[in-house]
């Protein structure tokens, strides 16, 4: 019987997913986790067939968790379940290794269709993610993706933390680096991306799935 691991920080939504899976014959919920790190641990110990994974969570985001889940449970299928409906979030999730992307606004029937599709080895993208959003993903949004890929891992981390509202001093403390080093990374990525202020940095981060848009 296929097993499902639910990784979602909102207990009420997690409970709803568990009830929905319970009405589908032949499926069982193997476990639940409320953050990305706990999800990785359970993926390793439970080795589920399918993982329903939120993006915005404490400790570790869904996108950050995907590669680590792939290391410990390579056979598991991963379905992102999120409120984030931008092409950047879809692209970031699929690039990280997700097998599907479903919006939390989907109805019960679509949830089950998506689950069945992934368990049969297919991909699935929410029906609400249509038009220019999907075209943007298919095209790879080449210019933006290319710019994001030009950044070093440290530059991406500094960009992400700035977009989340941290000052250079805050970031230096978080990354155990000097304020001068943080300023160097900041100057470098802003030049590469042709960004001029924090608002533009935040917009770029949201469009490319590096941070959330304030909606869980």
Image: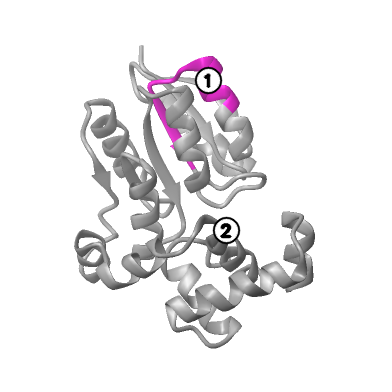
Question: Which residue is located at x 29 percent, y 39 percent?
Answer: 114
Question: Which residue is located at x 26 percent, y 61 percent?
Answer: 137
**Is 160 left, or right, of 86 in this rendering?**
right
Q: Position of residue 17 (x, y in %)?
A: 48, 36
Say which quarter of the image contains residue 155.
bottom right
Q: Position of residue 165 (x, y in %)?
A: 68, 72
Observer-nearest of 15 and 10: 10
- Residue 7 versus residue 58 in the image, above or below: above
Q: Which residues are magenta?
A: 41-53
**Is 113 left, or right, of 85 in this rendering?**
left
Secondary structure of the residue carrying tag 2 is helix
Residue at which label 2 appears: 154
Question: Which residue is located at x 37 percent, y 70 percent?
Answer: 147
State which tag comes first along the sequence, 1 or 2.
1
Q: Quadrant of the N terminus?
A: top left
**Is 116 left, or right, of 90 in this rendering?**
left
Secondary structure of the residue carrying tag 1 is helix
Disc sitting over residue 44 in the figure = 1
């Amino acid at each position: 019987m296929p097993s499902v691991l639910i990784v979602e920080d909102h207990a009420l939504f997690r409970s709803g997913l568990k009830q929905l899976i319970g009405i589908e014959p032949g499926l069982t919920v193997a476990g639940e986790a409320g953050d990305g790190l706990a999800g990785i641990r359970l993926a390793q110990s439970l080795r589920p067939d399918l993982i329903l994974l939120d993006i915005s969570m404490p400790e570790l985001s869904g996108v950050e968790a995907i590669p680590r889940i792939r290391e410990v449970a390579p056979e598991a299928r991963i379905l992102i379940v999120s409120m984030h409906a931008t092409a950047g979030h879809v692209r970031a999730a699929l690039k990280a290794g997700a097998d599907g992307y479903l919006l939390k606004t989907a109805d019960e029937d679509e949830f089950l269709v998506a689950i069945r599709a992934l368990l049969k080895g297919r991909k699935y993208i929410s029906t609400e993610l249509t038009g220019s959003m999907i075209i943007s993903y298919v095209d790879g949004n080449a210019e933006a993706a290319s710019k994001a890929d030009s950044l070093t891992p440290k530059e991406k981390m500094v960009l992400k933390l700035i977009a989340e509202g941290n000052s250079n001093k805050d970031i230096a403390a978080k990354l155990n680096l000097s304020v001068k080093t943080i300023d160097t990374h900041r100057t470098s990525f802003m030049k590469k991306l042709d960004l001029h202020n924090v608002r533009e940095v935040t917009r770029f981060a949201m469009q490319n799935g590096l941070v959330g848009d304030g909606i869980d």
